[in-house]
């Protein structure tokens, strides 16, 4: 059985999405299919086919979320003592040794990742390079543009 690591916030967001899919979107789709059926011939009814396709996506997403939530490994980082070690759920501030550019990332589950919000997936190359390292460690991350060296300057378990 595959375990899906996620933060408390990530699990809550999935539950909200699931509730919306089941209680709002699913009934809307069923209504749209019923209305499209009333228009007659289903073979050439684009509205009917679009609604059925949307229903397939919705049901697939519902199944996906339910499976992930049933196999979720919810990790509350705030309950752990900060040892300076980079772990799932921690927020890590790193500085590029060559450019002195500083950036912070929170390591989260795959469904929670959003690079625009500096939330990176635990399975991303940067997160894999950070996990297990300690405060003040130098790390090398292989990127498409080459290898970049960073120093870990802060590890936060509260965010």
Image: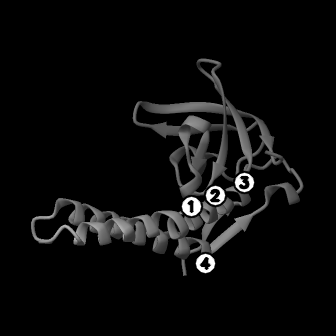
Residue 50 on image: x %, y %:
25, 61
- Label 4: which secondary element: helix
CA–CA distance in space, label 2 to label 1: 6 Å
Name the residue carrying label 1.
17
CA–CA distance in space, label 3 to label 4: 23 Å
Q: Residues within 10 Å of mark 3 (few under 14, many from 20)?
A: many
Residue 64 on image: x %, y %:
47, 71
CA–CA distance in space, label 1 to label 4: 15 Å
Name the residue carrying label 3.
87
Upstream in the sequence, badge 1 or badge 4? 1
Residue 51 on image: x %, y %:
29, 64
Q: Residue furthest top?
A: 99
User: Image quadrant for the C terminus?
Assistant: top right
Q: Nearer the viewer, mark 2 or mark 4?
A: 2
What residue is rendered at 56% in x and 71% in y? 68
Q: Residues within 10 Å of mark 1 (few under 14, many from 20)?
A: some
What residue is rendered at 54% in x and 68% in y? 23
User: Image quadrant for the N terminus?
Assistant: bottom right
Residue 70's label in the rendered image is 4
Q: Nearer the viewer, mark 3 or mark 4?
A: 4
> Which one is in front, 140 or 13?
13
CA–CA distance in space, label 3 to label 2: 21 Å
């Amino acid at each position: 059985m595959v375990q899906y690591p996620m933060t408390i916030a990530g699990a809550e967001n999935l539950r909200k999405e699931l509730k919306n899919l089941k209680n709002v979107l699913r009934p809307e789709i069923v209504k749209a299919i019923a209305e499209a059926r009333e228009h007659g011939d289903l073979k050439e009814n684009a509205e009917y086919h679009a609604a059925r396709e949307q229903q397939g996506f919705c049901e697939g997403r519902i199944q996906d979320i339910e499976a992930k939530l049933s196999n979720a490994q919810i990790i509350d980082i705030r309950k752990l003592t900060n040892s300076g070690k980079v772990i799932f759920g921690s927020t890590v501030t790193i500085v590029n040794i060559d450019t002195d550019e500083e950036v912070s990332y929170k390591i989260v589950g795959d469904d929670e990742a959003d690079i625009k919000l500096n939330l990176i997936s635990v399975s991303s190359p940067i997160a894999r390079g950070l996990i297990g390292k300690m405060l003040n460690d130098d790390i090398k991350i292989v990127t498409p543009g080459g290898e970049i060296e960073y120093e870990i300057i802060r590890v936060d378990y509260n965010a």
